Image (cartoon, helix red, strand yellow):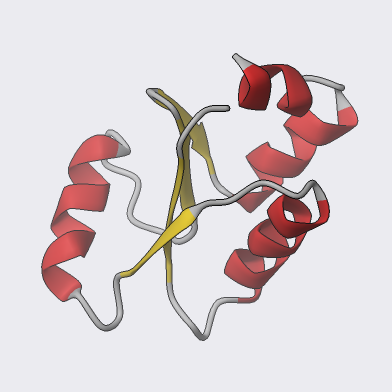
């Protein structure tokens, strides 16, 4: 199972939706709250190639993108493959 990291904010509905999908799939993930840890937001922007919105999702070394990207992978049947890689 790949490691999963989410950069989030507690006020973000898309963050909650992304976490809901991952919980529904029964996978564990680590969450980095950029509101409480603003120094981590700079790290997120660098890792996400300039993307500054939350969530930013990483599965292993792959930058998935945001919530819509995560759900797109799920609809295409590719999320489980990425999680298992």
Task: Point out the image quarter for the N terminus.
Answer: top right
Q: Position of residue 9 (x, y in %)?
A: 43, 76
Residue 20 place in picture, x, y as percent: 74, 63
> In this view of the protein, which residue sits in the foreground, 51 or 64?
64
Q: Position of residue 8 (x, y in %)?
A: 44, 67
Question: Residue 40 is drawn in which quadrant?
Answer: bottom left
Front in this rendered view, residue 24 or 39: 24
Q: Where 52 falls versus 68 (above or below)?
A: below
Q: Residue at x 22, y 62 (%)?
A: 41
Position of residue 85 measured from the top left corner of the image (x, y, whole percent)? 59, 14
Residue at 52% of width from left, 52% of height from top? 29
* 3 relative position to 74: left or right: left
Picture layout, residue 50 above or below residue 56: above
Describe residue 51's horizontal placement relative to residue 8 as left or right: left
The structure residue drawn at horizontal position 77% and vertical position 42%, both measured from the top left corner, is: 71
Identify the residue at image location x=65%, y=38%: 69
- 42 vs 48, left or right, is left
């Amino acid at each position: 199972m790949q490691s999963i990291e989410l950069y989030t904010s507690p006020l973000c509905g898309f963050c909650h939706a992304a976490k809901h999908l991952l919980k529904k799939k029964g996978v564990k993930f680590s969450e980095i709250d950029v509101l409480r840890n603003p120094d981590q937001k700079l790290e997120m922007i660098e890792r996400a190639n300039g993307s500054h919105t939350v969530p930013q999702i990483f599965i292993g070394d792959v930058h998935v993108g945001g919530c819509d990207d995560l759900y797109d992978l799920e609809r295409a049947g590719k999320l489980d493959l990425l999680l298992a890689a």
